[in-house]
Image (tube, grey):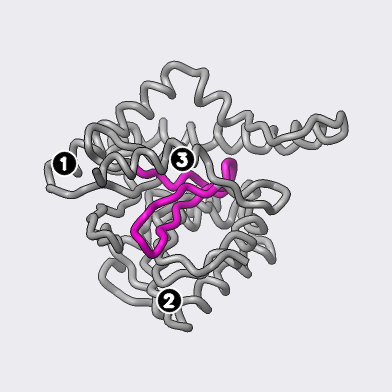
Amino acid sequence: MTSRVRSVFVSDVHLGTRACQAERLLAFLRDYPADHLYLVGDIVDFWAMRREVRWTAAQNTVVQKILKRARHGEKVTFIPGNHDEALREHVGITFGDIRIERECVHEAADGKRYLVLHGDEFDQVTCHHRWIAVLGDVAYTWLVRVNVWLSWVRRKLGIAGYWSLAGYAKRKVKLAVSFVGDFEASVVRAVRERGLDGVICGHIHVAALRDVDGITYVNCGDWVDSCTAIVEHHDGRLELVEWRADGDAGLHDAVASVTSIERIAA
């Protein structure tokens, strides 16, 4: 079991969908008890549940696990995203010891201040062309489903390692690459204008932890494809954790991540 950390940041779980990797999230949460747990949006996928509801026993256990952590003194903050935006009507209210906020500022142990928000307000497609966003969500869900079958075929052929079709598409499609870059630049610009040290967000399902012109840009990733989360250690150091299919946690780009944080601190 991993030692207790100061904070855990998780986004884009998409409970209620076939693609949600609830079992892997449960294993991660068991290994990372924390003082603070931030749920950074799209935890429940109301968009997908209008089309089809897939609520498994493991997904139910995720909810119970989070509620239990809150009851036992862990400070849990839920920041709704666009897929669970209905909960934004309850901002400022506490449900079952879980505080719902539109956004918040997290002060790390080393004094750095991070804006924590889902990030969909920086996505021009989601804000102004909702039908395109819904269409893209359907396409992404289809890619994730296909990836399940591809993973099965790869295992049967003895091909080691996890390979993501959805991730490959994002890296290769120029429009997607441009969108990710524009999103990151917009978020970083807003954080700089507010005089903060960094941002911790989600939304685009592309995990990251790096320095962008003196601002720490952090994206939690997701729990439908990459299965990644952010942890803060008791010295304020941030790490991006990738939870592999075999249950072993690994640091995603750990050397680069640690280097960027140390460079900012210097």
Q: Does the magenta stretch include residue 140?
A: no
Question: Which residue shows up at 26% across the image and 57% down it?
Answer: 103
Amino acid type, residue under disc 2 in the picture = Glu
- Marks 2 and 1, the one that precedes in the sequence: 2
Bin the neighbour count of mark 2 within 10 Å (Cα to Cα): few under 14, some 14-19, many 20 and up: some
User: Residue 106 vs residue 163: left or right?
Assistant: left
Write down the region rendered in magenta: 218-241
Q: Does the magenta stretch include residue 229?
A: yes
Q: Does the image show residue 37?
A: yes
Q: In this view, does 219 lie above or below 33?
A: above
Q: In this view, does 76 lie above or below 185?
A: below
Bin the neighbour count of mark 1 within 10 Å (Cα to Cα): few under 14, some 14-19, many 20 and up: some
Q: Is mark 1 on a helix, strand or loop?
A: helix
Q: Which mark is residue 74?
A: 2
Between the residue at mark 3 and the residue at mark 1, the CA separation in whole angstroms equals 20 Å
Q: Is mark 3 on a helix, strand or loop?
A: loop
Q: Nearer the viewer, residue 18 or 208?
A: 208
Outermost bottom residue:
72
Callout 2 touching callout 3 (CB < 8 Å): no
Amino acid type, residue under disc 1 in the picture = Arg
Name the residue carrying label 1.
Answer: 192
Q: Nearer the viewer, residue 194 or 113?
A: 113
Name the residue carrying label 3.
Answer: 207
